[in-house]
Amino acid sequence: MEQFDAIVLGAGGAGLLAAATAGQAGARVLVLDHADRPGKKILISGGGRCNFTNMGVEPECFLSENPHFAKSALARYTQWDFLALVERHGIAWHEKTLGQLFCDGSARQIVAMLMAECAAGGVEVRLSTGIGEIGHGDGRFRVAGAEAPALIVATGGPSIPKMGATGVAYDIARRFGLSVVDPRPALVPLTLSEGEMPFRAISGVACPAVARAGGMAFEEAALFTHRGLSGPAILQVSSYWRPGEAVSLTLVPGAMDALREARRRMPRARLKAALAEWLPARLADALAGRIGLERELGNASDADLARAAETLEALTFHPTGTEGYAKAEVTAGGVDTAALSSRTMEARSVPGLYVVGEAVDVTGWLGGYNFQWAWASGVAAGRAVAAKRR
């Protein structure tokens, strides 16, 4: 049986950077993945340009049963550290809205960078390799004909199953007695009922909005789809939304003042005409129908306008669910952080077992935050493995 200092399960972002970190510190590391290529999720991220981190990463941008857990890893490997790595490899990048950083070229550059870092650490990467049964005894882990005192689980969550994603990390965690916070799709479109058909019927219409759910609010674009609601603002709140709860959209901030001004300027106009000044025409039409104010604006009372303003500032939906893991960008929930060291990502009850990245109950906002968690947690585990070897 081949001997290594660490075996990493998963050749995604967290696994590759964990392996590279440990390898460059002198550890002999093996990476195993059932996929035929490394970094498959990286390759499709950011429209193929990989939104690899965010200028504004803070612990408050992450969702977890323990909101403090991510602080240590994020503080010890920051967005600036990863950006320095990107620049060292000569990868051109640009900043888009809300601090999001993308490759100028292709996400393939990030994967090539991670593989180069692994090569620099002498890491062996075996693709198209099943994990099979994991043996454990005498302080050593045995996987696919290899043995090591450290096992890093970096197999992600079940989001985007067409890429080969599974919940195997949870099976491994339970096999070793670690608890799992119920996983669920996150950063995912929401579905609406037939009763919301006027809005499902305007599929493809998008507009700026403030979306609210689960006590959180995000100001970005909202998109109406043939199945319900999507767009960045909706994806953001979807991580906090729970079945049975409402989602509201502010489409016209300060709507009462805006409607009064419209009444003054265009007293002969109907509500739809005023709404069309602020919103896409098809959305204005659907909203006018929902509000039901038929008279000319000049004949509308303040009470009429107040009712209309209430809808424009808090257009409320009761989603029937989400579009599931197939359309989810990430998975919320995962291996319970109570079972792990926040500094090293090692299981408290199983020395040598580490869990990193999306497999852990830490979920970031849309916009590069989940990649930063992958990098930070992977580095934390890689450093810990190397430190134990010394």
Image: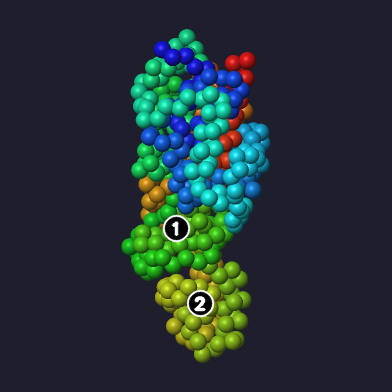
The numbered dot on residue 230 is 1
Between residues 294 and 75, which one lies in front from this camera angle?
75
Identify the amino acid type marked 1. Answer: Ser
> Residue 145 at what x, y percent from top left?
39, 17
Q: Residue at x 46, y 32 (%)?
A: 11
From the image, tell me which residue sits under label 2: 275
Taking 256 as reference, is 239 left or right?
left
Q: Where, quadrant-wise, is the N terminus in this rendering?
A: top left
> Residue extending furthest front?
90
Residue 341, can we see it?
A: no
Q: Residue at x 51, y 22 (%)?
A: 29
Q: Helix, strand or loop at disc 1?
A: strand
> Residue 265 at what x, y percent from top left?
59, 87
> Residue extending furthest left?
194
> Residue 226 at what x, y percent from top left?
36, 62
Q: Is residue 129 above or below residue 215?
A: above
Identify the amino acid type marked 2. Answer: Leu
Taking 38 as reference, is 197 left or right?
left
Closer to us: mark 1 or mark 2? 1
> Residue 103 at what x, y percent from top left?
55, 49
Q: Helix, strand or loop at disc 2?
A: helix
Residue 85, can we see it?
A: yes
- Mark found first going from the N terminus, 1 or 2: 1
Q: Residue at x 63, y 15 (%)?
A: 390
Q: Is residue 161 above or below residue 390?
A: below
Taking 354 as reference, is 191 left or right?
left
- Tell whether label 2 touches label 1 (CB within 8 Å): no
Distance between the Cα atoms at labels 1 and 2? 21 Å
Q: Residue at x 38, y 34 (%)?
A: 35
Tag 1: Cα neighbours inside 10 Å, few (<14), some, or many (≥20)? many
